[in-house]
Amino acid sequence: STTNMAAIANKAMLFLNPSTSSTVVNQWATLPVNSNVSFSGAQDFTIAFYVFANSPFVHTGGFYDNNMNYGGPGIWFWNSPGTPTVQFNYKNASVATLAGTFPIGQWVYVCAVRAGGILKLYLNGVLNNSTAEGSWIPTYTYPARVGTMFFAGYPHYNGLNGKMDELRIYNRALSNLEILAILPIKLNF
């Protein structure tokens, strides 16, 4: 554990995966296969967290992967097109934040929402981008991962080099006002 966004010790998760390799993943967390977070069909949901991605940015980093390669939700960041963006995937469709809006080296509030077939990505409480979800039927065979990405036969790749705080998973789509209410005032976004 490490300091959180308010600099309080032992309040956030620290993932010190090598910033130079996408395949070496030393640190991650898992959540057991659980019907409370294994969303399917028309189930709306929200995944929200604060993240601090260490600089320099070299390779993709996984934030949350609940069987993303099998249609479940996944959130990660990568370098496209030439600047870091956050990506939210569900049912094999994906939405990315607009280029240049995800800062490296500072705390950012990320909120991914599935609402009525639409995937929405919020940064610091503001809707950044949205798109229609895919058509795959999710299967949840493997435990969800935090701080890495997962695929059977290649169990951990693209580990996060940074910190995460306040990971929250809701079994409904939060409203814009609810998303803003989670933001701490002291961050002055």
Image: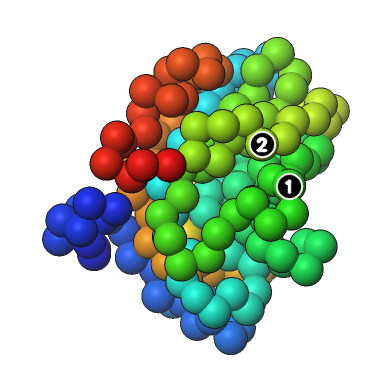
Quarter location, residue 59: bottom right
Does 14 sit left or right of 44 as displayed? left
Q: Earlier in the sequence, mark 1 or mark 2?
A: 1
Residue carrying label 2: 128
State which quarter of the image contains the N terminus: bottom left
Name the residue located 78 percent from the left edge and 68 percent from the top edge.
Answer: 82
Q: Nearer the viewer, residue 188 or 82?
A: 188
What is the x, y in percent for residue 51?
44, 54
Contact (CB < 8 A) between labels 1 and 2?
yes
Name the residue located 58 percent from the left edge and 86 percent from the top edge.
Answer: 20
Q: Nearer the viewer, residue 115 or 5?
A: 5
Residue carrying label 1: 98
What is the x, y in percent for residue 26?
44, 76
Q: Nearer the viewer, residue 54 or 93?
A: 54
Name the residue located 75 percent from the left edge and 40 percent from the top edge.
Answer: 95
Does 4 sit left or right of 65 as displayed? left
State which quarter of the image contains the C terminus: top left
Mark 2 residue type: Asn
Work out whether residue 101 can be spotted.
Answer: yes
